[in-house]
Image (tube, rainbow, N blue to C red):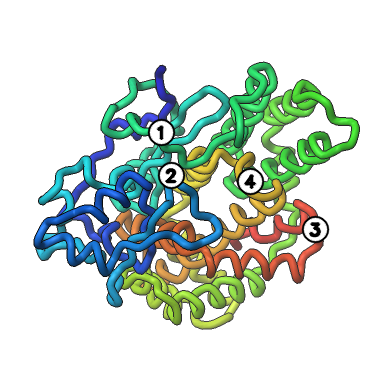
Amino acid sequence: MQITVPSYYPKFNCSGAQCEDTCCSGWWNVSIDRQTYDKYQQSKDAELAPLFAISVSKNTLPSADDKSNYGLMKMKADGECHFLQADKLCAIHKHMGAQALSDTCRLYPRYLNRFGTQRENSLGISCPEAARLILLDPQPMQFTSISPDPSIDGKAFTSYQFPQQSEGDPQQIAILNDFRTVIFAILQFREISVGARVMMLGFLLEDVDKIVFSEKFTHASELLPTLQSYIDMLSHPLQLQAQFEQIDADIPHKLKLTNDLIAQSLLGSASPRFKTCLHAATEGLSGNDVEQYLRNHTAFYRPYFADREYILENYLVNQIVTRLFPFTRGSYLDLYRELVCNLSVIQVLLVGIATKHQGLNEELVIQLFQTFARNSNHNRSHMDNLVASLHAHEQDSFVHVMWMLKDA
């Protein structure tokens, strides 16, 4: 069976000891599959066995299962893995070989998903090398097919799957795949701004949500007229952009959201690399001075992104790919709210960083996107709290999330 992947996927190679933000550090608990857990518990290696004893334990969380997250590997107090050597390489890999690594360590930063019978692999941007491949390509993200790699695809491991318990009805899965295709078409429609594209995505999700969760809904084919109507809308870019311009901005609220995230992250276990971004953003944002923010947006942020909106586009498209958006977790509205909130906060942080450095470059942009993803995707408490705060203040609809899309 062939595997569908973004065109960047075959180009990825782990940079190992040269990585500027190793995945072997980060205050996270690494899930361990049952087979690897048993292997570690039975190890008699004089160097590794004592480390297994203090770092590996059975997973007692309610989400634990007998396969992918049967055990947990805890980090040291400083956030580093017990098996990270001075040369920044893995002691387990050195002494026991690559086959002894847990699924988490073996596969990161890969996502191995299933949509119906279709297998889909991709990369997350919390890895610096992956982030460069994903974000910096000026061409719209394309997809291709590759043969399975036994070292990656040989075990029964899935990051996200839809439907959860079966392969689904092929006819309906095909239509839902068309739904995803329309999402990609909207997000890669470069005749309008990224903000206008995400606005369109919100309206599409709202319309689909009304159909799918109606008491009268019986079959995915009922979505086809709505999907066609959104494809037709792409013939009128000026109208779409004009509609976006009618949305009222709320820069003070955006600044408060971002400053709340900065404060929580600096007090929490954010990585040193992420804290560098946050300190620069804090200095550049000058508190909640809206007029200064708007001037800095024009002077330092806009010159870099004026012809590089593809970076934001690639980020959004990759979020859709890696998480099988919008099918795998929560309601459409919750997932949309999270996506918009992430984009909004990233843009504000970039304005602060651009102000601090009197401009932006690839290194600064990649560092922010990569560390933000690492903090929000793998340590969700801060972002979950941020998104939850929107429930308390905003009406429960897609349109009432869209003020966050106005970046100036």
State which mark lies toward you, 3 or 4: 3
At 45% from the left and 81% from the top, the residue drawn is 267
**Sequence-wise first label, 2 or 3:** 2
How far is disc 4 from disc 1 in space, using C-alphas? 35 Å
How far is disc 3 from disc 4 in space, using C-alphas? 17 Å
Q: Amino acid at mark 1?
A: Ala
**Sequence-wise first label, 1 or 2:** 2
At 53% from the left and 22% from the top, the residue drawn is 117
How far is disc 2 from disc 3 in space, using C-alphas? 37 Å
**Sequence-wise first label, 4 or 2:** 2
Q: Amino acid at mark 3?
A: Asp
Circle number at residue 67:
2
Q: Residues within 10 Å of mark 2 (few under 14, many from 20)?
A: some
Image location (x, y in percent) of residue 381: 53, 68
Q: Secondary structure at mark 3?
A: loop
Circle number at residue 198:
4
Circle number at residue 396:
3
At 28% from the left and 27% from the top, the residue drawn is 150
At 53% from the left and 73% from the top, the residue drawn is 261
Residue 337 vs residue 378: left or right?
Answer: right
Residue 97 makes an appearance in the image: yes
Residue at which label 1 appears:
156
Image location (x, y in percent) of residue 326: 63, 41
The front one of 360 and 50 is 50
How far is disc 1 from disc 2 in space, using C-alphas? 9 Å
Residue 87 vs residue 104: left or right?
Answer: left
Q: Amino acid at mark 2?
A: Lys
What residue occupies the far right of the structure in this picture? 216
Q: Residues within 10 Å of mark 3 (few under 14, many from 20)?
A: few
